[in-house]
Amino acid sequence: MHKQKLDIRAPIIAQLSRGTGIGWLRVAVLAIVDSLTIAAAWYLADLWGTPVGGFSLLWNLDGKPGFLVPIMVITIGILWASGLYGTDDRRRDFFSLIKSLTLAQGVLLIVGYLYEPEAVASRSTFLLAWIFNLLFVFSERLIIHLTIINLRHKGAIRQRISLVGQAPDIEEAQKLIQKTKQYVICDAEDIGLRQEEDWSSLIDKLRLKQVSEVFVCSHLSVKQQVSLYWELKTAGIHLRILPMGLELPIQWSEIKMVNGLPTMRFRSPPIIGGDFWIKRGFDLVAGSLILLATSPILTAIALAIKIDSPGPIFYKQTRIGVKGREFKVWKFRTMVVDAERLQKQLEEMNEMKGGIMFKMKEDPRITKVGRFLRRYSLDELPQIINVLIGEMSLVGPRPFPLRDVERFSEHHHMRHEVLPGITGLWQVSGRSDIIDFEDVFRLDMTYIQNWSVSLDFQILFQTIKVVLGKEGAY
């Protein structure tokens, strides 16, 4: 007798999604650690702040409970509402963390004065609590984040996934996903080779390999989408769409429902308006501090260049900046005086694919001091001047010479929508070891579409590590 197949939409046969328990455990642990950190911050603030009669964190003299529990509930609630316990990258948005903790402190201040104005903490206690909360929670989250990154680089706590799509899209998706160090690709299903409509064999294979999520990276028909979704739902496996062929700035869009119809609405791209002024203020403060701290080094480099070879100390070259405007970039001279004339004779030895950028590992034009400066990227330090006068930023896409920009394809000019930077994702992802300009462009666009203050901090810290390790430098 033929066995009747159960309706895959029946909720009683749907398994608990793989990884759900671990996900909730991760959230619970993070919330508990945050709560302990917040409690410690308020305890120290209460201990060191100016005492006010009637206020107690734990228990009042009249037998009423103190305010520590409401404080933690309100603070954790705001962090939760801000997406800082979610499953996406927003959980690691440190700038959003700072804003949320500051908002929580403001809400506590208002609630305290409205609810019981005679039994609130002193202004010094509130100020200390705000500072300690920022310091403790930021540090705790940063330590957890760095620990997770370190474990993932060692191959631990990675999510097991499968890719579904056409062979070229699967290949591109593998390159992108492997860079995240977050997933282990256990299986790849080429839909171009599929002969059957049923996904059961694929689902069985995914179950055996304990896959928790499937990434679809090519277009599927409506029938295929519905069938695959319900099969995965039944098996407790999540489905995610990775739009490899969709050349739209997905990070700048949000899904909105209009009378039951899903639509994609585009938001303003980052690094404009208020974002620009936040970034500009950071550049001015950090740039000034870097210039003061490195002034002895700058003086020593200038003397070494003058002694090593004839010619000026600085080298100024026309580069293309924001909106395609030309400007002069400042660098320490690392080549002989007639380097640009000699480059024409060396073009056929260019090691960059596509010929847009010019790179040679054994460039004969580089001086002895220049080779040392390039190895540690010290030749870039004078660009702090460009940062202070507003032509560049500390972090951003590298500005290219006219010779390189003239070889750009049309889509490459999207790099010029933001201020160019001294360092960026390209520099911390391999620098000169990356020989395909399309990879450089992809890294630049990733930075532009995902910009945040915390990302700038991460790139600057990573730059120090890359420079000291002389990774990809020549």
Image (tube, rainbow, N blue to C red):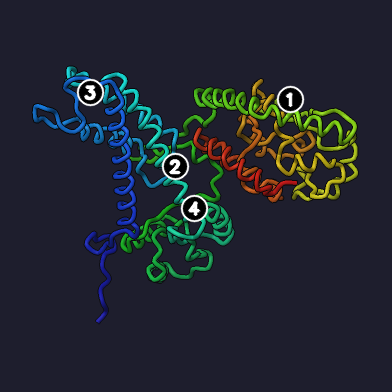
Q: Residue at x 38, y 41 (%)?
A: 262
Q: In the drawing, what numbered circle is on residue 327?
A: 1
Amino acid at pointer 4:
Asn
Q: Residue furthest left?
A: 62
Which of 22 and 101 lies nearest the eye of the viewer? Answer: 101
How far from the left and from the top, in percent, is residue 312? 85, 28
Residue placed under numbered mark 3 in the picture: 111
Residue placed under numbered mark 4 in the picture: 150
- Say whether residue 144 is left or right of residue 217: left
- Say whether residue 302 is left or right of residue 120: right
How far from the left and from the top, in percent, is residue 209? 41, 69
Mark 2 burial class by Cα count in 10 Å: few <14, some 14-19, many 20+: some
Q: Residue at x 34, y 51 (%)?
A: 26
Q: In the drawing, what numbered circle is on residue 142?
A: 2
At mark 3, the secondary structure is helix
Is the C-beta separation of discs 4 and 1 under 8 Å? no
Measure the C-alpha gap from mark 4 to mark 3.
Answer: 41 Å
Measure the C-alpha gap from mark 2 to mark 3.
Answer: 30 Å
Measure the C-alpha gap from mark 3 to mark 1.
Answer: 52 Å
Q: Nearer the viewer, mark 2 or mark 3?
A: 2
